Image (cartoon, grey):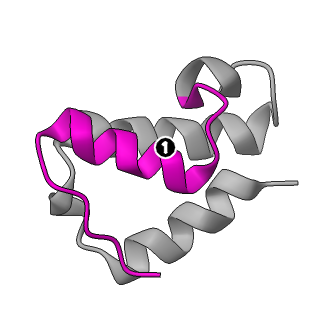
Amino acid sequence: MIIYTKYFSGFTKENDQHNVSSDQFKRIMNIVFVEGILQGTLLTDLSGNLDPKQLVREMFMLSGDKVTLQG
């Protein structure tokens, strides 16, 4: 099951990618890539095994922004 790819697809459609720092956006893209290729092994290292919504909140926090997500 590709949960991060599905979630981030909707997330990027509803939210401007500039709401997170470039480092965190790269992190999103790396997670999607790893999930698609490995579907598991390295994904935990990148995602911290958080559910997608919690992971995005962490990314906003690390980007120094207040979290206001749609959906």
Q: Position of residue 13 (x, y in %)?
A: 41, 80
Q: In this picture, which residue range is highlighted in magenta?
A: 47-71
Is residue 41 found left or right of 61 in the rendered image? right
The residue under the point 23% across, 33% down is 62
Q: Position of residue 56 (x, y in %)?
A: 42, 50
Q: Quadrant of residue 38?
A: top right
Q: Position of residue 40 (x, y in %)?
A: 81, 29
* Residue 14, placed above or below residue 35: below
Q: Nearer the viewer, residue 36 or 43?
A: 43
30 in the magenta segment: no
Q: Nearer the viewer, residue 2 or 33?
A: 2
64 in the magenta segment: yes
* Residue 57, placed above or below residue 19: above
The residue under the point 23% across, 72% down is 16
Mark 1 is surrounded, within 10 Å at the Cα level, by few (under 14), some (14 to 19) or many (20 or more) other residues, namely some
The residue under the point 53% across, 56% down is 53
Is residue 41 found left or right of 10 in the rendered image? right
